[in-house]
């Protein structure tokens, strides 16, 4: 990137002499960008809220803001816009602190020349691009670590973390907490008869049906294969059984594709005072196994 690729440079600077000097430097470096100058932070924020800007040249001391809060307020308003902080010789320490707070670079006004300014703007824009790309990658990895790749609901690892938190809450406040475990009946037959693509479709459809039915604070997870866990805070044993029955009927009557019907077997249990994660999930698993043994497409409670 060079300065000719810039479209808009916003300069938030209240000193007319400094503003003119910086504009002249940019012109000498054959910068073809539109240079917008405002004297107050509030004006700069307003401009950024309504216009695209490639980079901001920010004076740290303005009529309506001074010190580090000037930079942090601007960053809060425009988190994706690169910022080059302008400081005086007496407040260079603010420039260093601004880098720690999120600015891409800082320049001491008395030391600026055209080449330094051009280089600073170039690196500020490129660093911001890299920063955004790294954040997107990090967010993607964090999401992949928590979300089941196929169904888009929580995976077992994330569910285990959330379960621990809900167990602690139930112990502390004596609140009710119920767990529903269900397994799709004869799921292997679906894969063998209709193919694995149809099996994947069924799993995704099940996750969607449950997600559309439960409350916002209920937690649905793919436990493994065709097994799912549903954690229902502030829900007693009987309420959880009613929810399980609602889901059982929903699955049984849903047309998954060209008349394909799918059923599930459910195990329901409620938190007991001496429960830990393993005992709680094991009891739900045992109840679900009983439902399988007793004919499938049914609910058993423990």
Image: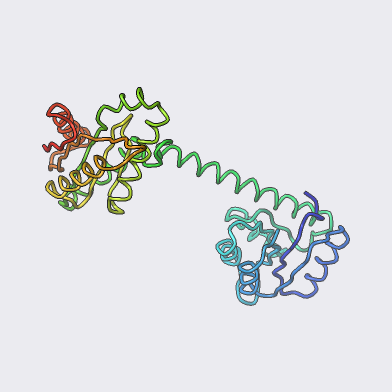
35 relative to 1, above or below: below
When asked about the image quadrant of residue 78, the answer is bottom right
Depth check, front residue: 301 or 90: 301
Please report the residue visible at 57 percent of the width from the left and 62 percent of the height from the top. Answer: 72
Depth check, front residue: 182 or 44: 182
Is residue 85 rendered to the left or right of residue 293? right
Is residue 141 rendered to the left or right of residue 184? right
Look at the image and tell me in which quarter the C terminus lies. top left
Is residue 138 rendered to the left or right of residue 271? right
Please report the residue visible at 87 percent of the width from the left and 58 percent of the height from the top. Answer: 30
Is residue 4 rendered to the left or right of residue 178? right
Q: Please provide percent x and percent y for residue 172.
A: 19, 50
Q: Please provide percent x and percent y for residue 76.
A: 55, 62
Q: Please provide percent x and percent y for residue 49.
A: 61, 68
Please report the residue visible at 70 percent of the width from the left and 52 percent of the height from the top. Answer: 125
Q: Please provide percent x and percent y for residue 258.
A: 36, 37
Q: Residue furthest front?
A: 258
């Amino acid at each position: 990137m060079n300065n000719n690729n810039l479209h808009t440079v916003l300069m938030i600077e209240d000193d007319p002499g400094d503003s003119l000097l910086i504009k002249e430097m940019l012109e000498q470096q054959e910068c073809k960008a539109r240079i917008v100058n405002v004297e107050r932070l509030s004006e700069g924020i307003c401009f950024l809220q309504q216009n695209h800007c490639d980079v901001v040249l920010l004076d740290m001391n303005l009529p309506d803001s001074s010190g580090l809060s000037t930079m942090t307020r601007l960053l809060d308003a425009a988190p994706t816009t690169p910022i080059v902080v302008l400081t005086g010789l007496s407040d260079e320490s603010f420039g260093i602190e601004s880098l720690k707070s999120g600015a891409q670079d800082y320049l001491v006004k008395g030391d600026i020349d055209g080449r330094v300014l051009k280089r600073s703007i170039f690196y500020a824009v490129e660093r911001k691009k890299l920063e955004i790309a790294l954040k997107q990658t990090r967010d993607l990895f964090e999401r992949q670590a928590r979300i089941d790749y196929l169904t888009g609901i929580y995976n077992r690892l994330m569910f285990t973390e959330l379960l621990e938190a809900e167990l602690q809450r139930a112990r502390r406040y004596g609140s009710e907490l119920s767990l529903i475990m269900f397994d799709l009946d004869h799921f292997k037959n679906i894969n063998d008869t209709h193919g694995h693509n149809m099996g994947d479709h069924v799993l995704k459809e099940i996750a969607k049906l449950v997600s559309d039915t439960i409350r916002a604070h209920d937690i649905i997870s793919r436990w493994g294969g065709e097994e799912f866990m549903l954690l229902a805070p502030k829900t007693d044993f009987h309420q959880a059984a009613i929810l399980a029955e609602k889901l059982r009927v929903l699955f049984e009557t849903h047309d998954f594709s060209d008349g394909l019907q799918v059923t599930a077997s459910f195990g329901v249990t409620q938190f007991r005072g001496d429960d830990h994660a393993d005992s709680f999930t094991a009891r739900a698993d045992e109840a679900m196994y009983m439902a399988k043994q007793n004919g499938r497409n049914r609910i058993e409670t423990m």
